[in-house]
Amino acid sequence: MGYYTQDDCRIDDFKALIAQPLDSAQLRFASEVVGNIPVYSTADTTAALNDPTDRQALMAEWARVIGDLSGAVVLKGAVPDLDALDQATAIFEQVIAEERATNSGGDHFGERGANDRIWNSLQKLCLRAPAVFARYFAAPVVAAVSEAWLGPWYQMTTQVNLVRPGGKAQVCHRDYHLGFMTGAQAQSFPVHAHHLSPTLTLQGAIAHCDMPVESGPTKLLPNSQRYGPGYIAMLMPAFQEAFEDHCVQYPLEKGDGLFFNPALFHAAGDNRSVDIERMANLMQIGSPMGRTLERIDRTAMTRALFPALCDLGLTGQARAAAITAAAEGYPFPTNLDTDPPIGGLASESQAELLARAVDEGMSESEFEIALVENQTRRLP
């Protein structure tokens, strides 16, 4: 089988997979297992990380859970400096107020006024309050779980999500990379890429307040990250229904961390509370290996290629091959404040712009304006 299709998505196989229990005897360091999610206490985790032998064993256990077992771990007290966390919360609230005033904020998963999103909260916190940033991220547990899944030199990114009382739940989904694609786009990637994608990212969330179940902490479907065609299945009603019937939620306390495989079916829950503004600092932590060998000025190449494509009249697969060799075909990484998704989960890529420009018969001056705008929107 070279490519997954909807025909490969069999609901009975999926239900059998998500029904598998997690045997706590397989876990040396977890303090308990709740709804197939292992929970690690602050004391036990700290002690293990301070012992070189136990540190490696604990990290190997986390990687096994995230990849081969239930797919998620709860790490109590992941950010131990609660004073720094509270100061970060105050800064994030200030950023939200400022961005709402300029209409630059918002959340692509919910209505404005119910949810708020801070894109790139990592940089915004660091530049506004570097000492708070340093104390906040002086969190050995966060570093260790990131390294456990991605190895050293991982790349941290964060996005704050604030859901007020009445905020609605998300539809179940997987995340970056293939989870940010349409079904047709995901089906265009070979099977081995579906298996590779989850190893390139670790999902995480740091609770900035206590999150009882009524406040809507993340709904998780243990074992679902191991379902091969899941990036296609997640869009199908039968699988979404199975998610709602079998998902679990773990209540978090302020400073706790939830870390999980990006291929795990998950969704933020309904905030059914009357007074809890549920704030989490979401983490999408990337592998250092998702980069090309050389730095290429693809904007310059795209600019030079446009008139040649117009003159040559290449079409179909030949034209697509020439564009792919030169232009940036992937819309990430980008600046989500200035380059938000357009009609989906991603903005127009450089390669898509180049193809559109040729199709529409843009002049060189028109294309130059569009190319600069495309590039500028992506800059931090």
Image (cartoon, rainbow, N blue to C red):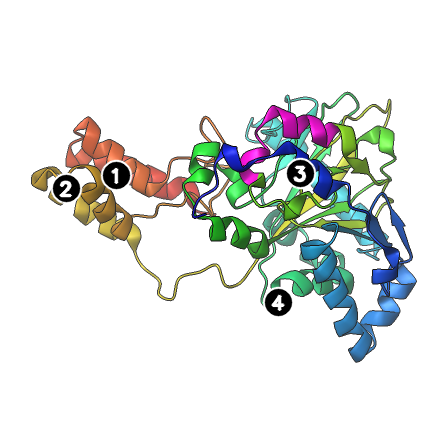
Q: Which mark is residue 193?
A: none
Front residue of 373 and 254: 254
In the picture, residue 367 is in which quadrant?
top left
Amino acid identity at mark 3: Phe
* Residue 225 x/y as whole percent: 65, 46
* Residue 289 x/y as whole percent: 50, 63
* Residue 77 x/y as whole percent: 85, 55
Q: Are marks 2 and 1 in contact (CB under 8 Å)?
A: yes
Front residue of 363 and 15: 15
Q: Which residues are magenta?
A: 231-244
Mark yes or no: residue 94 visible.
Answer: no
Q: Are marks 2 and 4 in contact (CB under 8 Å)?
A: no
How far apart marks 3 and 4 lie (CA) works out to 30 Å
For residue 35, side relative to residue 16 (left or right): right
How far apart marks 2 and 4 lie (CA) works out to 42 Å
Residue 300 in the magenta stretch? The answer is no
For label 2, the crowd category at 10 Å Cα-Cα, with few meaning under 14, some 14 to 19 and many 20 or more, is some
For label 1, the crowd category at 10 Å Cα-Cα, with few meaning under 14, some 14 to 19 and many 20 or more, is many
In the picture, residue 40 is in which quadrant?
bottom right
Q: Disc 3 marks which residue?
A: 14
Q: Which mark is residue 151?
A: 4
Q: Residue at x 61, y 30 (%)?
A: 107
Amino acid identity at mark 4: Gly
Amino acid identity at mark 2: Leu
Q: For marks 1 and 4, give the one nearer the viewer.
A: 4
For label 3, the crowd category at 10 Å Cα-Cα, with few meaning under 14, some 14 to 19 and many 20 or more, is many
